[in-house]
Amino acid sequence: MKRISCIILVLILTLVFSLPVVASSDASDIETVRYSISANDQQIDLLKDLWGQKMTKGEFLKMVFPKHYEQLPPEIKEYVNGMQQIWPLKPSEVEKQKSDSSETVEPKGPVVVRKDSTIDNTGSLIEFESYSNVWYPPDYKVPYMEITSSLWRVSDENDVLLDFEFESATYVKELSAAGNYYVSTPGWHMTTGVHFFEFESGPSSWVSDSGDPIWVE
């Protein structure tokens, strides 16, 4: 009986230690590079005109945030020039996206990342956020992480983009794109986000939303 138990234990240990691990945890000594952008009213109007068009992230930043693009650290500029722009969902698109799981690309490897969008208010002040953080492996840093967070006023006729935040960084465990917005027109409001990751195994992206809209006036 003892011999059988030992054989079973050896087989279990062999399976555990032979699992393919894509994440590399030897990046702890690499310097983190961060960059953030908040859109102004003029840039919000330009975003509305460009929304949904196919382009690279670099092209998007050149058109909407040209000064910020020129100031990007080389590490981040290299990433944005080589990736496609992923637009956050409009509130009217959220349910459609949730029912179509084929739109989500999962990372290849044992990396567990939490990602979500939130919204809250104090009177007419809205606080909104989209964030990501690595749960497993505990010491793993993503080579490149990027988040966009969009605040919307929701209506049956048209979803109105109110604010837009962009945050990116290299070799980080967590990242957040957040903003504040004072409401001048009462209505229902909602946050949607895009979470992009460049793993050792390749790129992955997700969308998120803050759930049911909240009424703010």
Image (cartoon, rainbow, N blue to C red):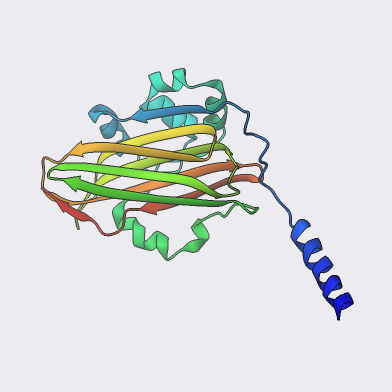
Question: Residue at point 25% right, 46% down?
Answer: 152
Q: Quadrant of residue 71?
A: top left
Instruction: Tell me if residue 21 comes above or below residue 80 in the rendering.
Output: below
Question: Residue at point 48% right, 22% down?
Answer: 72
Question: Residue at point 83% right, 66% down?
Answer: 10
User: Residue 193: x, y in percent?
Assistant: 38, 46
State left or right for residue 144 relative to residue 62.
right
Instruction: Tell me if residue 140 comes above or below residue 44 in the rendering.
Output: below
Question: Residue at point 78% right, 67% down?
Answer: 12
Q: Quadrant of residue 214?
A: bottom left
User: Residue 150: x, y in percent?
Assistant: 32, 43
Residue positioned most to the right: 3
User: Residue 75: x, y in percent?
Assistant: 57, 25
In the rendered image, the quadrant that contains the N terminus is bottom right
State left or right for residue 188 relative to residue 198.
left
Residue positioned most to the bottom: 1
Instruction: Tell me if residue 125 comes above or below residue 75 in the rendering.
Output: below
Residue positioned most to the front: 2
Foreground residue, 214 or 13? 13
Foreground residue, 173 or 90? 173
Instruction: Tell me if residue 119 comes above or below residue 35 in the rendering.
Output: below
User: Residue 40: x, y in percent?
Assistant: 26, 28
